[in-house]
Amino acid sequence: MSEEAVTGNNASEGAKKVNTIPLIEAKKWAKRWKKKEGNYNKHHELNAFLIPKIDLLEVLTEDVDAVRAYIGIDDNGVEKLMIVGTKYDPLTKIYVDMITVGVGNEPAGQDDIYDFTTPCPNACDKNSPLNQ
């Protein structure tokens, strides 16, 4: 991951989002977490995720009421935290994921599911009291 991706220095370079993955990829990662490694304790070395600033800034510009984070495993076996904007539905009292691209009759394209997170270990603050 580049320093630019972490700090969000390219956030003002236009409307193109960075650090997004397609819905089909996110579904594959989430399924892999649930099916192959569904027992959380199997990920005993996973302590935290480093989340790039740009991911947070971009999801917050989507007129969200909240965000939801899903856990997945990418094609390299690395744990990932996927961030999705949500809207509150007062009828159901549920925060609904704002995923429309590639769902139903919506046209194919890039979904706003953010991930360039890095798991800890190895992206850890070894001096953090939360990592002792």
Image: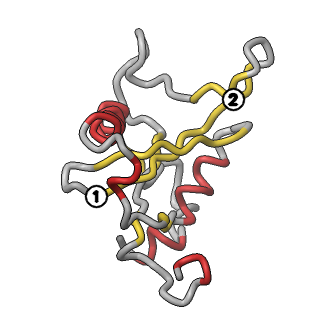
Q: Name above or below for residue 107 compared with residue 22.
A: above
Q: Amino acid at mark 1?
A: Val
Name of the residue lying farthest toward the right: 90
Q: Residue at x 43, y 46 (%)?
A: 71
Q: Position of residue 92 (x, y in %)?
A: 73, 14
Q: How many marks?
A: 2
Q: Is residue 101 left or right of residue 131?
A: left
Figure quadrant of the N terminus = bottom left
Query: Which quadrant of the structure image shows residue 88?
Result: top right
Within 10 Å of disc 2 (Cα), the crowding (few <14, some 14-19, many 20+) is: some
Picture coordinates of residue 115, whole percent (x, y): 42, 52
Which mark is on residue 87?
2
Identified at 58% across, 51% down, the residue is 58
Q: Is residue 36 left or right of residue 63?
A: left
User: Relative to 34, is 102 above or below?
Assistant: above
Give the SS element for disc 2: strand
Q: Residue at x 53, y 82 (%)?
A: 132
Give the Cα separation between the discs numbered 2 and 1. Answer: 29 Å
Q: Secondary structure at mark 1?
A: loop
Colouring chosen for the image of the structure = secondary structure
Check the image and name the residue furthest to the bottom. Answer: 127
CB-based contact (under 8 Å), mark 2 and mark 1: no
Task: Give the image location of residue 19, x and y in percent.
Answer: 42, 54
Residue nearest the observer in this picture, 1 or 31: 31
From the viewer's perspective, is the residue at label 2 or at label 1 nearer? 1
Please report the residue visible at 48 percent of the width from the left and 71 percent of the height from the top.
6
Q: Which mark is residue 78?
A: 1
User: What is the crowding at mark 1: few (fewer than 14 residues within 10 Å), some, or many (at least 20)?
Assistant: few
Q: Earlier in the sequence, mark 2 or mark 1?
A: 1
Which kind of residue does numbered mark 2 sit on?
Lys
Tell me: 110 left or right of 54. Answer: left
